Image (cartoon, helix red, strand yellow):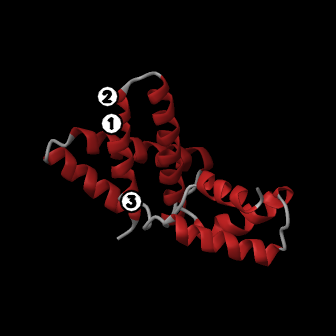
Amino acid sequence: MSLKIRLMDDMKNSMKNRDKLRKDVLTMVRAAIKQIEVDERVELDDESIIDVISKQVKQKKDAIEDFKRGQRQDLVELTEKEIDILLEYLPKQLTESELDEIVKAAIDETGANSLRDMGKIMSNVMPKIKGRADGSMVNNIVKQYFK
């Protein structure tokens, strides 16, 4: 079953079950997908849909930081629930140790020897972890190697 069909089926089920939060999150995802399809006049495949969902997870994580600064715990909790729903549609997320191994291999492959080579390392790592980890996590791990 394609991801787009799964999103639609899950949205229908959430409407039947009166699960407003899930319905709202899925509606938001479907709207983002539709917007890209209309703008670019393409039909998105599962990989592209995963990119859209990953981008929304990243936006939500950024929003959580803003909500924490504004001392809005209610919005932090709501956004965390939304992220949990979005993560159900992404591939299994990598652990920090798995990510560390991938970064270490990329450093060896690219011959990177300083923080200036961050671009080489990131361009090597990001296609391998697409949708399974956040770029900022990779960035932090790379920085640890070149302290």
Where does label 1 land, which residue? 77
Quote the CA–CA distance across marks 2 and 1: 5 Å
Q: Identify residue type, mark 3.
A: Tyr
Q: Residue at x 35, y 59 (%)?
A: 88
Tag in front: 2 or 3: 2
Where does label 2 land, which residue? 74
Quote the CA–CA distance across marks 2 and 3: 24 Å
Where does label 3 land, which residue? 89
Q: Which label is found at residue 129?
A: none
- Ranked by sequence position, the earlier of labels 1 and 3 is 1
Tag in front: 1 or 3: 1
Q: Is residue 79 left or right of residue 114?
A: left
How many numbered circles does the render carry?
3
Q: Is residue 43 visible?
A: no
Q: Is residue 106 left or right of residue 76?
A: right
Q: Is residue 94 visible?
A: yes
Q: Position of residue 114 (x, y in %)?
A: 85, 61
